[in-house]
Image (spheres, rainbow, N blue to C red):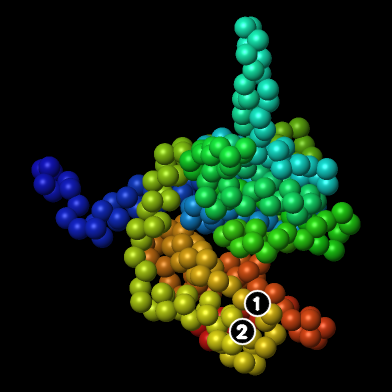
Amino acid sequence: MSASEAVPTSLDEAVASQAERALDRLAAARTAVEAVIFGQGAVVEEALATVLSGGHGLLVGVPGLAKTKLVETLAIVLGLDSQRIQFTPDLMPSDILGSEVLDETPDHKRAFRFVQGPVFAQLLMADEINRASPRTQSALLQAMQEHHVTVAGQRYDLPRPFHVLATQNPLEQEGTYPLPEAQLDRFLMQIDVGYPDRDAERRILLDTTGDTVSKPKQAMSVDDLAQAQRLVRRLPVGEMVLDAILDLVRAARPGEGDPAIVRHVAWGPGPRAAQALMLATRARALLDGRLAPSIADVVALAEPVLKHRMALTFAARADGETISGVVKKLTARFS
């Protein structure tokens, strides 16, 4: 093959060439995660799609469903430097961001030195994030959106890539605080983690109570992940898919959608939801071995992308309506 033949002749060919190299790595990463996390295929897919999209994920479920183990496994499989913060009621913002300490030199000169907190990692696990006060939770707002933090007026850039995967216990449990709406909006997806089925739970029992336990193995490097993330942003999106994303997000806002549905909605998703859905559908397509998203991807990801960006009216909650039910009604027209 000549040099001219080796060079892609169009953007589409360049994307396809990159995709061929990325697909094998992504398939290996998914297999490596599912070799440790049993019976949670949809959860694994959504978590990988979140990271591929360059976003942050909120994993919600009762204790004991391997949410923490999933985040630890992703860090190893994707080759990311990780840190973990156990959120508790007495946690302070400085415990996350870091703080300045006063140093004294041998010649008795004093100066402040910044000591980095655990937020300075490529993958930050915010474990049981809703057990800390809203003030402490809000310490992550700037980091999650702008990828840097400001301490004592000084800017400190975070590593690249930077992802927050937070676990959250259901709000009905004791000792939990609701996350501020502004912070919820910064999570690309809310990933609901449910109970495994009988076969998966059987595998869990056999794997975790014997002499040996399955351990995750690295399948990608940071460079591999960065290339895959760039590829996600280059995948083409058809006009029908683009219109479906816009129609869906706008239909979830009071005053814009079907009155019979949106009358239950107190406030709906903003433009950031459409951005998240656009990226997530591309990432899901790539994980599935496709080079362009479909309307089926939009429908599949509508709930995890939208549900934490919406709130129901008091009357709707009293009538037994749920956000999941509202999203299903909104997506019914695309099915």
Q: Are marks 1 and 2 in contact (CB under 8 Å)?
A: yes
Camera sees residue 40: no
Quickly name the residue at label 2. 254
Camera sees residue 270: yes
Residue 35 point in image, percent of width and height: 61, 46
The amino acid pointed to by label 1 is Trp
Which badge, 1 or 2, is on the more N-terminal residue? 2
Q: Give the number of the disc on residue 1.
A: none
Binning the other alpha carbons within 10 Å of mark 2 as few (below 14), some (14 to 19) or many (20 upward) gives some
Quickly name the residue at label 1. 267
Binning the other alpha carbons within 10 Å of mark 1 as few (below 14), some (14 to 19) or many (20 upward) gives some
- From this view, report whether residue 188 is shown above or below residue 20: below
The amino acid pointed to by label 2 is Pro
Mark 1 residue element: strand
Observer-nearest residue: 236 or 158?
158
- From this view, report whether residue 257 is shown above or below residue 37: below
Residue 63 point in image, percent of width and height: 80, 52
Observer-nearest residue: 223 or 26?
223
Observer-nearest residue: 55 or 148?
148
Q: Is residue 107 left or right of residue 158?
A: right
